Amino acid sequence: MDTALLFSGGKDSLACLYLNKHRWDSIFVVWLNTGAVDEQTYDYMMKWKEKLPHFIELKSNQPEQIKEHGWPVDVLPVNNTHLGKYISGEEGPAMQPYTNCCGSNIWFPLHDGVKALGVTRVIKGQRNDDGKKSTSRDGDTRDGITFEMPIQDWTEEQVYDYLKSVGAELAPGYVAGEKTGRDCWDCTAYLGDNSTRIMNLPEEKKREVLRRIGIIRASIEDQWRF
């Protein structure tokens, strides 16, 4: 097999999965389990594992990476980075850019895992109107891998319409009104998209994430004083 489809359980990768239903017997379907996925999402992905002949579960260790490098943030208070803490003497928790966190826990291990499979084509559910997306586009080739992005020109509405037309079962978060997938239950970044996800967490986990966000906000405000 020379093709892998990246499947996060999110709506866009789900649309790509159904668009390629006729190829399920001849492609890898690859999921990256960060080690911080919630139980509902894990159960959802295990249902797919039973259906898909070549389902591959890759793993990273987000809890350990967070422990070492700090909470992911959208706006980085520099004194809370490891180097900043050393220079400033800041005693608060460590923080890191969301790009570092996602890169270490999702993007790089996913890319390395796909390369290890020996595939030359990767199907990816990226849209041009995504707020945040990779620099790759449909047809680009990098590291010997050519990217197929079949819904690149679709709108979010078109994705939902298509999934409804094929009777797709959405992941639990979307049913609960969330905008994105649930790669990590304790994400403290992407707050513009993640607010509903955070408020949908079980009470104990919600309190913990909100506590962290409060500390992050206070650290930003303290270092932004003029």
Image: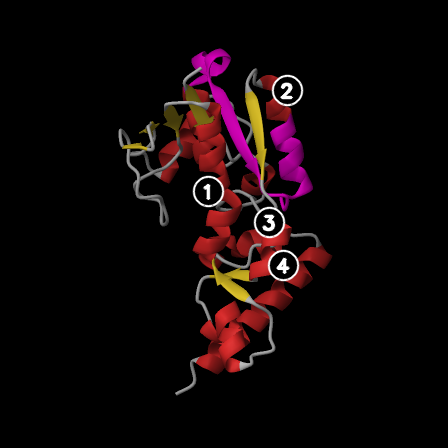
Indicate yes or no whether the magenta region holds residue 168. Answer: no
Q: Residues within 10 Å of mark 2 (few under 14, many from 20)?
A: few
- Classify residue 221 as left or right of residue 146: right
Cα distance between the residues tagged 1 and 3: 13 Å
Image: 82 above or below 199: below
To which residue does mark 3 refer? 62
Dot 4 or dot 3, earlier in sequence: 3
Neighbour tally class for label 1: few under 14, some 14-19, many 20 plus, Cα within 10 Å: few
Q: Residue at x 50, y 58 (%)?
A: 189
What crowding class fits label 4: few (fewer than 14 Cα within 10 Å), some (14-19), or many (20 or more)? few
Q: Tell whether 60 sits left or right of 77.
A: right
> Any mark on residue 108, and which?
1
What amino acid type is highlighted by mark number 1? Phe
How far is the residue under mark 3 from the one under mark 2? 25 Å
Task: Select label 3 or label 2 by which is in front.
Answer: 3
Task: Compute the Cα span from label 1 to label 2.
Answer: 26 Å
Q: Are marks 2 and 4 in contact (CB under 8 Å)?
A: no
Residue 129 x %, y %: 31, 43
Mark 1 or mark 3: name the one nearer the start of the chain.
3
Residue pictured at 55% horizontal, 59% vertical: 188
**Residue 90: which quarter of the image?**
bottom right
Q: Residues within 10 Å of mark 3 (few under 14, many from 20)?
A: many
Distance, label 2 to label 4, CA atoms, is 33 Å
